[in-house]
Amino acid sequence: MPTSTPERELDLESPIGGPPLVHSTLPRWAPHITLATAILAGFALFGIGISVGLSAIVVVLLYGVAIYSWSRPVEGARKAKDRVVTAVVTSTFLLALLPLVSVIITVLTRGAARFDITFFTHSMQGVVGAGGGAYHAIVGTLIVTGLAALISVPIGMLTAIYLVEYGKGKLARAITFFVDVMTGIPSIVAGLFAFALFALFFGPGIRLGIMGAIALSVLMIPVVVRSTEEMLKLVPNELREAAYALAVPKWRMIVKVVLPTALAGIATGVTLAIARIIGETAPLLITLGATTGTNFNPFDGRMATLPVFSYYEYVNPGIPPEPSLQRAWTAALVLIIIVMVLNLVARLISRLFAPKTRS
């Protein structure tokens, strides 16, 4: 009988003819100690007059070199490279966060001075110098943005439904092309379009709230179309086929099956589109102008909005300029809070209306 050759036992620590398959690992505290040492070196460089940016770059370089030199003989080249790449990616992420953190801190510190009841309950009617508030601008922002959403959401959703469910041929390709073009339109062009449209009928001196809503809708419609289109494409075709198998008409299938399934994503996209346009300034400077009083009628006269209010308070401060600058920063803070609330609402809508699946 032939004898079986005994299998060679695999030595994980020192295989024949190759590097070790298993290496030791650095202690868990090793990256933290290395990073802390590099940060201390960065503070030392900053203390002797080196700029913050250059000190941060030195910290990253010192950490990368130190952790690689420590990890290479202990964990091997692959793990050492992985640690260096992790450090580079993390540093890049923190670098990208710096402008956001800087803006938030600046707006919070400077806008907190006038974040009081008076700011939310009084307008600038008859106010010179200190005092006053942005009640009229907050009301104008909500009215103009609401009208823009009322115009944009039906148009955007119906366009997306046509492109996904019905669109074929040259017309669908043309609509897709123009939606892509509208996505990249500068906001000032949208304002000029609305101004020129109304100037043809009412003259060049016209300023109305509805003009600002139309200008913002030009910016909002392509965002709604794109977000709704992508959500509708995610609906499985099996659901459509099941509805067709039950002899359900196509329009009813869209209303009862497709739209409810994609409702969470559509609502999130609409909310983010509103957050996108609510801070626009350039088109509103052209179409709305500025006013110090409260106007609830978007079809009669000028209206104030938070972006325009903040802009004029900052570029045209009174004497002394401090009250105007405080109002400008507080208006910017309120606008940031509104955008943050809209983003939180978008996440909440996405959770509440997402299709329920069995666990």
Image (cartoon, rainbow, N blue to C red):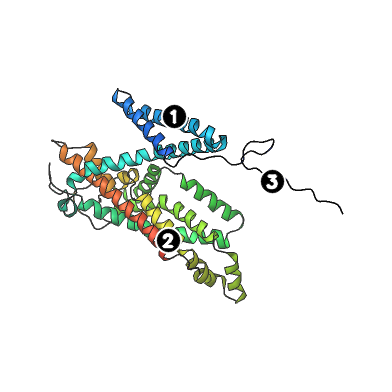
Task: Give the residue at x 50% y 66%.
Answer: 261
Which label was assigned to residue 133? none
Please name which of the two marks, 3 or 1, marks the residue nearer to the observer: 3
Q: Is residue 335 left or right of residue 26?
A: left
Residue contact at pointers 2 and 1, CB within 8 angstroms: no
Mark 2 is on which residue type? Ser
Q: Earlier in the sequence, mark 2 or mark 3?
A: 3
Q: Position of residue 346 (x, y in %)?
A: 39, 58
Q: Position of residue 246 (x, y in %)?
A: 60, 77
Amino acid, disc 1: Leu
Rounded to the nearest whole Å, what is the CA distance between mark 2 and mark 1? 41 Å
Name the residue beneath numbered marker 2: 350
Q: For residue 248, which quarter of the picture?
A: bottom right
What residue does disc 3 label?
9
Does residue 97 appear to the left or right of 168 in the view shown?
Answer: left
Label placed on residue 61: 1
Is residue 328 something one can see in this rendering? Answer: no
Do residues under tags 3 and 1 come within 8 Å of each other at their CB atoms?
A: no
Q: CA distance from mark 2 to mark 3?
A: 55 Å
Is there any visible trace of residue 105 in the rendered image?
A: yes
